Image: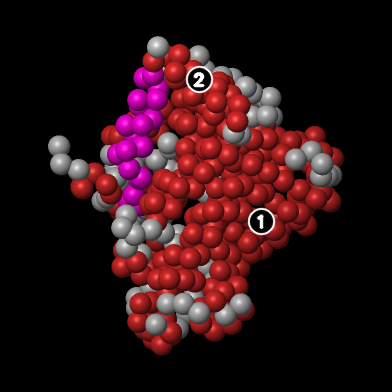
């Protein structure tokens, strides 16, 4: 009787509501819960992240990570709110945008699948500790904005309605803008986008390379410019004075990001790197990561170079201490690659999706979002008493 009732509920939901709408609303609720009080307080927003919304090219010259602050200054958003409110509202905006475009894309990727086949993958996305749960929790970080831009670029690249040249223009602009937002984006989602373009147009690239070369040089020029001229030369004291004059909440923000050289970052980051921290700082994180890797390498029928592109975020662990964050970015790339493979009809449906699979997903989900570094890999764990 219980099984019959469950079947009726399942049939009612799938027949009267679009499955993607249910998962979309659920994922947005997850993101909102994890970034709003009482789950997170305004005081918990990192002071170092607030500076991203204020440093700009008009006041500080051509500096690293000044793109968002420059846009906000043009529209005078900084005059309307305190730093904490501005960061939270910005985060909420990009969260909702990401939630909608993710599920719109997922719907197009799995359009030829029936609901029974979709549900395991949709549950995998929704209950992931690094997608909606962590994106909501990690308030204010530029990774979310870069992810939104990357997802839009992936959607455009997989759409066969546009020419190879139009897609090359968009990819060049997308990668360049992401570099201006955060130069680390070069290793986050850009390699996956580039490999996807190579997969779609490998033959065309060979024959039209001279035509595409100027577009390829734009991100390269942007990256080199930031590398050689992106530091704030007046130094830490001048930067602190500028930010404190705006608001005391910005005290000491962006000191490392705008002052340190790449060499200094490498020396500091590499000295803190261990095998345990490289894989997230927790065996729970490591287990889930290898579970996702198993799905990618077992059931996705795409070229090896596309699969290898998911590992590039891990290279950032050699120049920064945010090891868990970079493993999370790699895991997000795995989820994006699952979507891409479904869109390209290169995804096999595993037969082992059963009760154990869902128990595992729910257990990982309720443990909570991943943190930033191995010093606090699973922030919610400290609130549990075993």
Q: Mark 1 points at which residue?
A: 174
- Viewed as shown, does residue 180 lie left or right of 55? right
Q: Which residue is tagged 2?
A: 8
Q: Is residue 371 magenta?
A: yes
Closer to the N terminus: mark 1 or mark 2?
Answer: 2
Q: In this view, does 289 lie to the left or right of 306?
A: left
| Callout 1 secondary element | helix
Which numbered marker is on residue 4? none
- On the image, which quarter does residue 102 sit in? top right
Left or right: residue 161 compared with residue 132: right
Residue positioned 40% across, 71% down in the render? 84
Image x and y of residue 70, in percent: 58, 75
Q: Residues within 10 Å of mark 2 (few under 14, many from 20)?
A: few
Q: Nearer the viewer, residue 201 or 144?
A: 144
Q: Give percent across and percent down for residue 382.
A: 20, 47
CB contact under 8 Å: marks 1 and 2: no
Which corner quadrant of the image does residue 214 belong to? bottom right
Query: In the rendered image, which quarter is residue 4 located in?
Result: top left
Quadrant of the frame with the C terminus? top left
Residue 25 lies, in percent from the top left, at 52, 44
Nearest the viewer among 356 and 336 is 356
SS class of the residue under badge 2? helix
Q: Which residue is drawn at 70% across and 58% down?
A: 173
Q: What's the residue at 42%, 74% (across, down)?
A: 83
Can you see residue 320? no
- Screen quadrant of the N terminus: top left
In front here: 296 or 378? 378
The residue that appears at 39% across and 56% down in the rendered structure is 35
Tell me where the magenta segment starts and ends, as one range.
355-374
In front: mark 1 or mark 2? 2
Main SS of residues in magenta: helix
From this view, report whether residue 121 is shown above or below residue 51.
above
């Amino acid at each position: 009787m219980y099984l019959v009732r469950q079947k009726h509920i399942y049939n009612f939901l799938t027949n009267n509501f679009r499955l993607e709408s249910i998962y979309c609303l659920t994922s947005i609720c997850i993101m909102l819960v994890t970034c709003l009080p009482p789950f997170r307080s305004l005081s918990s927003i990192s002071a170092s992240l607030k500076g991203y919304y204020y440093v700009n090219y008009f006041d500080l010259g051509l500096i690293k990570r000044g793109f968002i602050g420059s846009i906000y200054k043009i529209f005078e958003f900084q005059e309307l709110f305190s730093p904490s409110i501005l960061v939270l509202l910005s985060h909420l905006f990009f969260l909702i945008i990401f939630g909608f475009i993710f599920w719109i894309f997922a719907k197009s990727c799995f359009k030829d699948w029936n609901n029974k086949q979709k549900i395991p993958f949709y549950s995998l996305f929704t209950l992931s500790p690094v997608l909606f749960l962590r994106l909501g929790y990690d308030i204010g970080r530029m990774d979310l904005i870069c992810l939104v831009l990357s997802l839009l670029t992936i959607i455009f690249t997989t759409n066969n309605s546009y020419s190879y040249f139009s897609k090359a223009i968009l990819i060049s602009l997308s990668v360049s803008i992401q570099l201006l937002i955060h130069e680390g984006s070069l290793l986050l989602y850009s390699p996956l986008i580039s490999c996807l373009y190579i997969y779609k147009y490998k033959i065309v690239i060979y024959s039209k390379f001279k035509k595409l070369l100027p577009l390829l040089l734009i991100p390269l020029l942007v990256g080199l410019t930031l590398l050689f001229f992106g530091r704030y030369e007046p130094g830490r004291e001048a930067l602190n004075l500028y930010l404190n004059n705006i608001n005391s909440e910005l005290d000491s923000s962006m000191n490392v990001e705008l002052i340190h050289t790449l060499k200094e970052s490498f020396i500091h980051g590499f000295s803190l790197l261990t095998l345990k921290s490289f894989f997230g700082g927790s065996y729970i994180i490591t287990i889930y990561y290898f579970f996702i890797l198993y799905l990618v390498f077992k059931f996705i029928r795409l070229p090896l170079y596309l699969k290898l592109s998911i590992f590039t975020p891990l290279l950032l662990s050699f120049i920064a201490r945010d090891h868990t964050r970079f493993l999370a970015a790699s895991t997000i790339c795995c989820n994006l690659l699952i979507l891409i493979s479904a869109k390209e009809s290169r995804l096999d449906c595993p037969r082992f999706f059963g009760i154990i699979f869902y128990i595992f997903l729910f257990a990982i989900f309720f443990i909570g979002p991943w943190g930033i570094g191995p010093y606090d890999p699973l922030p919610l764990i400290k609130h549990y008493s075993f």
